[in-house]
Image (tube, rainbow, N blue to C red):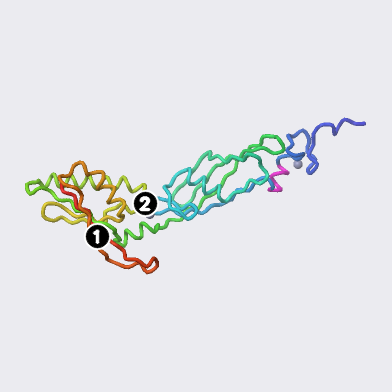
């Protein structure tokens, strides 16, 4: 009896002295694609205004984690136990990019680790929130009013502070933006895309006010789909 085949060999391709997973070598297993499948290409939609990207129907902050989530949602790991997908690197320019991924898991009790590259195609679009803002959509007006003797400088500074606050809040709320700005006697009016953002700003600046915030609302449109009036809110802040 020869001892030639006492060593391990793959019954499919016959290669010897290789690590076997469930009796087969890694090349044969991967050829069969029974272990896992990763998309070769992914198209991503990125908003050219706010830079957020769409992941499973939701617009989220652009990040490596979001990219990985997208790769994961298009993959399957049926043949792997404890599969793990890790992002090793990302390179993206305006239109194209690549994701470098590491896939690991167990097959027939053996640890397996493979690297894959997924190419990205970037589509620059305008997300729904941004298209609403660009159409000067707004849900709230923030009125800032000052004492009669308040200087122009003080008024201007407060305006910058409020705008900076809203700008910072834009990460969480894409409509947290000033779509119109108007100076009036002793103050200014800011038309803000989101009511929630305006409310948040009121909370933040409340400590600096002489009086409580006064909120009023009026109906400016009707939502036919939801069958209810659309209100616009005015928040008056007296500094
Ligand atoms: Zn083989
Ligand atoms: Zn956007």
Circle on res. 217? 1
Q: Quadrant of the N terminus?
A: top right
- Residue closest to the eye, 82 or 181: 82
Within the displayed image, which quadrant is ligand 1 positioned in?
top right
The residue positioned farthest toward the left in the image shown: 149
Q: Against 231, is 214 above or below?
A: above
Q: Residues within 10 Å of mark 1 (few under 14, many from 20)?
A: some
Give the SS element for disc 1: strand
Segment colored magenta: 27-33
Whether the residue carrying mark 2 lies under 8 Å from ligand 2 is answered with: yes
Residue drawn at 46 percent across, 56 percent down: 123
- Name the dominant secondary structure of the magenta segment: helix
- Residue closest to the eye, 148 or 116: 148
Give the tally of numbered discs.
Answer: 2
Q: CA distance from mark 1 to mark 2?
A: 29 Å
Instruction: Give the image location of residue 122, x and y in percent.
Output: 47, 53
* Residue at image mark 2: 50
Give the SS element for disc 2: loop
Q: Is residue 143 magenta?
A: no
Residue drawn at 56 percent across, 52 percent down: 41
Q: Against 180, is 14 above or below?
A: above
Position of residue 111 in the picture relative to residue 215 (left or right): right
């Amino acid at each position: 009896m020869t001892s030639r085949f006492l060593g391990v060999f793959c019954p499919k391709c016959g290669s010897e002295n290789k690590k076997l997973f469930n009796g087969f070598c890694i090349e044969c297993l991967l050829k069969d694609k029974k272990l896992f499948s990763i998309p070769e290409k992914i198209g991503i939609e990125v908003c050219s205004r706010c830079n957020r990207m769409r992941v499973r129907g939701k617009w989220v902050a652009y990040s490596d984690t979001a990219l990985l989530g997208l790769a994961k949602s298009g993959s399957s790991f049926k043949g792997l136990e404890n599969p793990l997908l890790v992002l090793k690197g990302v390179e993206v320019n305006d239109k194209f990019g690549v994701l470098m991924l590491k896939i690991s898991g167990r097959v027939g009790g053996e640890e397996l680790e493979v690297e894959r590259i997924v190419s990205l195609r970037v589509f620059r679009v305008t997300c729904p929130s941004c298209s609403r803002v660009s159409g000067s959509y707004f849900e709230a007006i923030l009125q800032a009013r000052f004492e009669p003797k308040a200087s122009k400088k003080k008024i201007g500074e407060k305006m910058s502070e409020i705008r900076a606050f809203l700008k910072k809040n834009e990460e969480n709320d894409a409509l947290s933006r000033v779509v119109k700005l108007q100076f009036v006697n002793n103050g200014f009016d800011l038309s803000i895309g989101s009511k929630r953002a305006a409310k948040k700003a009121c909370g933040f600046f409340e400590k600096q006010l002489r009086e409580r915030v006064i909120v009023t609302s009026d109906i400016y449109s009707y939502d036919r789909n939801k069958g209810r009036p659309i209100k616009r809110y005015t928040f008056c802040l007296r500094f």
